[in-house]
Image (spheres, rainbow, N blue to C red):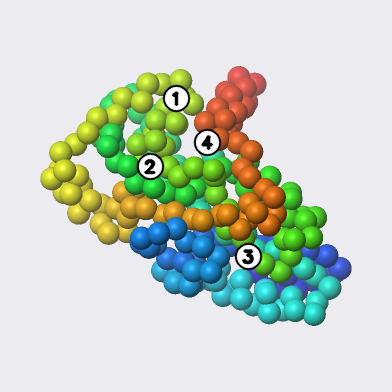
Amino acid sequence: TLRLAAAARITGVKRFIFISTAKIFGEGADGPYRESSPANPGDAYSLSKWQAEQQLLQQGVGSAMEVVILRPPLVYGIDAGANFARLLQLARLPVPLPFAGIDNQRAMIGIDNLVDLIKLCISSPQAAERAWLCADDRVYSLASIITIIRRSLKMEPKLFRLPFAVQQIIKAMLGTGMAARLYGDFALDCSATRQHLDWSPPYSMEQILRAQLHQEALSNQT
């Protein structure tokens, strides 16, 4: 990241937008994370993002190249990897799933919404030399994510509820990290981004997934 920024500065790039991660705050806080929340990166990925942020902002002082940092949570879309890809695979299965009643609250952002914010940050005078949190207008539970995906696929949600004791066994089998990502909360307060950049996410998750799935179907036909 730093080498790319240095090369951009030498060649006269006016603004450098770095996509960091909201995971620099860690996970497991009771309330939503804000820009003022202390950094607590919990793995090598988020630590490397945090270190790059600090170096970029320090190097930007007195430089002709402005730095903008965006801190998204999980970015979703039909081509997303990792956890969202697994949820897509689960949702596509033609069987009921045991996620009814799981009402956790997780911030996420659709790829189209993130791109919209990046486009704004290219030219917005207010965006420079700061780090901004960004997420969709709503938070998502595991149950709501599966429901939205299945509706986007024109499927019935078909969710059922497991007894509490069985859910606890599943969490133990998944391990602390995976259980936290599936069942835990991860909320963000993006009010500063919305207020100072006059930005709000233009699309819902269902709009994004329906549009992408339609495009995927057209591509498969050709």
Q: CA distance from mark 2 to mark 3?
A: 26 Å
Along the viewing direction, whichever of 121 and 193 lies nearer the viewer: 193
Instruction: Give the residue type at disc 1.
Output: Arg
Residue furthest left in the image: 165
Residue position marked by numbered label 3 in the rendering: 131
Give the total of numbered labels.
4
Q: Which residue is mark 2?
A: 141
**Cα gap from disc 4 to disc 1, whole angstroms:** 11 Å
Q: How far across and down, in percent of the image, does residue 186 sit?
A: 41, 54
Given this view, does label 3 or label 1 mark the residue nearer the observer?
3
Q: In percent of the image, x 33 and y 52: which residue is there?
A: 184
Query: Circle 3 sits in a helix, a strand or a loop, which is it?
Result: strand
Which numbered disc, 2 or 1, marks the residue closer to the eye? 2
Give the residue displayed 24% in from the left and 30% down from the top: 160
Type of the residue with mark 3: Ala
Res. 96 in view: yes
Residue 151: give its label: 1
